[in-house]
Image (cartoon, helix red, strand yellow):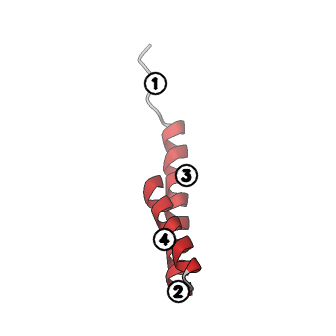
Amino acid sequence: MLGYALIFLVIALIAEALGLGGVAGESAWIAHILFVIFLVLFIVSLVFRRRPPV
């Protein structure tokens, strides 16, 4: 998930450098959403991770 967010961020940066504002905005928005989903899943996995039986 984090890999996809970074890919979309790179696409957004390249599109912005080429002057493609619409593509850059959409790619940045997708990267932001994927990063937020990654953070939520990461925090949930830290809270509910399996502990070895006692």
Determine the CA span between mark 2 and mark 3: 26 Å
Q: CA distance from mark 1 to mark 2?
A: 46 Å
Q: Secondary structure at mark 4?
A: helix
Which residue in the protein does label 3 denote? 39
Pointer 1 with pointer 2, Cβ within 8 A: no
**Which amino acid does the dot numbered 1 rest on?**
Arg
Q: Give how far apart the Cα atoms at labels 4 and 1 are.
A: 39 Å
- Which numbered disc flags the more N-terminal residue, 4 or 2? 4
Question: Given contact means CB atoms under 8 Å apart, are the residues at marks 4 and 3 in contact?
Answer: no
Q: Choose mark 4 or mark 2, whichever is in front.
A: 4
Q: Nearer the viewer, mark 4 or mark 1?
A: 4
Marks 4 and 1 in Cβ contact (< 8 Å):
no
Precedes in sequence: disc 3 or disc 1: 3
Occupied quadrant, residue 52: top left
Of the two numbered discs 4 and 1 on the same chain, state the one appearing first in sequence.
4
Q: In the image, residue 31 lies at what x, y percent?
A: 51, 66
Q: Where residue 22 is drawn, which disc sits there?
A: 2
The foreground one among 17 and 24 is 17
The first of marks 2 and 3 along the sequence is: 2
Residue type at mark 3 is Leu
Relative to 48, is 19 on the left or the right? right
Depth order, front residue of 12/50: 12
Tag 2's secondary structure? helix
**Element assignment for label 3:** helix
Check disc 4 and report the residue beneath it. 11
Q: Residues within 10 Å of mark 1 (few under 14, many from 20)?
A: few
Q: Which residue is mark 1?
A: 51
What's the amino acid at mark 4? Ile
Task: Please tell me which residue lies in front, 33 or 4.
Answer: 4
Residues under labels 3 and 1: Cα distance? 21 Å
